[in-house]
Amino acid sequence: MAPTALLPESDFDRRAYPDGMDFPVWHAADGWPHRAYRWAAEGARRGSLLFQSGRADFIEKYLEACGHWHDRGWDIEGFDWRGQGGSRELKGGLEPDDRLSFDQLIDDLAAYLAEWKARTPRPHVMVAHSMGGHVALRACAERGVVLDALVLVAPMLALNTGRVPRFVASAVVGLAKLARFGRRAIFRDNYANPRRYLRLTASRPRYEDSQYWKRAIPGMAMGPPTWNWIGAALAGARSIARKGALEGVRTPVLLLAAGLDKLVRDEAIASAAERLPDAEMKIFPTGRHELLREADDNRLPAMAAIDDFLDRRAPRP
């Protein structure tokens, strides 16, 4: 029996690069080559929007979301994080994602933002997902980055450790690193599990799009995080939770949370929204982690919330 065809859920071709998108190389201060992307708006320009994705992501997963903002007149720009996507040597394997700290990513983002703001027209806004949201918020809090508006989509402000208390999780990571397991993956991901996609999105077609790009560009896919990476994420969450860490942020922030998120803690997002001087929060009770790639009953309201926030807080010049 032939498999049931998956409905595309939109007319946008998520498996092809849009006309006009370029992929320059941007070098960080230490010379690390990053794959950047630029997609200039056509006609009257709305402003400049920088989009940054999450752990193990690559821009191809978010062409549809970028297409929406591009249609609204935004110049789109961003880059794949150091060590993932097109900003690493594509070897074709599923190497674990190993980081000791997110500090280098914060430095990379702050440097890129400084150059981007200097050569592009206002308003300057940023949309960041998951780990990208973690890095973006800390860039504002710790490096003094100021934008006209910032949108954090399911930001990884604290890992969702389920029923395991955070202090226990930190202790387990510490023991694993003492045992020299730091660079080992914390689990084996079963890509053959047909329900794996539900951890990320209720949209099977959009999940399959990401698998298509992993097949089309060998080496784009990454393996699970290591114990080192989990330790870095837990340490970063402690930095964000520290008293006074967010209270000096001078950028208006919209935080979007997914009620069925299995990867990040909605409570940490809500706490950040209360502590930031100028913040709004919206939760999607039936949404999963990848809100920008969710089924349309959650994706479309999330996109509308972003548009409304940017129209109010970063109006057309």
Image: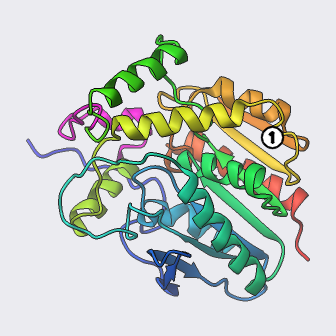
Answer with left or right where residue 313 lies relative to residue 241: right
- Residue 56 position within the rendered picture, expressed as x and y whole percent measured from the top left: 39, 52
Residue at 48% in and 16% down: 162
**Vertical order, 41 against 267 (above or below):** below
Q: Nearer the viewer, residue 94 or 199?
A: 94
Answer with left or right where residue 102 lies relative to residue 243: left
Residue at 49% in and 49% down: 293
| Residue interval drawn in magenta | 185-204
Q: Is 192 a magenta residue?
A: yes
Q: Which residue is mark 1?
A: 246
- Residue 10 position within the rendered picture, expressed as x and y whole percent measured from the top left: 48, 58
Answer with left or right where residue 207 lies relative to residue 188: right
- Mark 1 surroundings within 10 Å by alpha-carbon count, few (fewer than 14), some (14 through 19), many (20 or more): many
- Residue 83 position within the rendered picture, expressed as x and y whole percent measured from the top left: 39, 61
Instruction: Tell me which secondary structure the magenta stretch mostly adopts.
Output: loop
Q: Is 297 a magenta residue?
A: no
Element carrying mark 1: loop
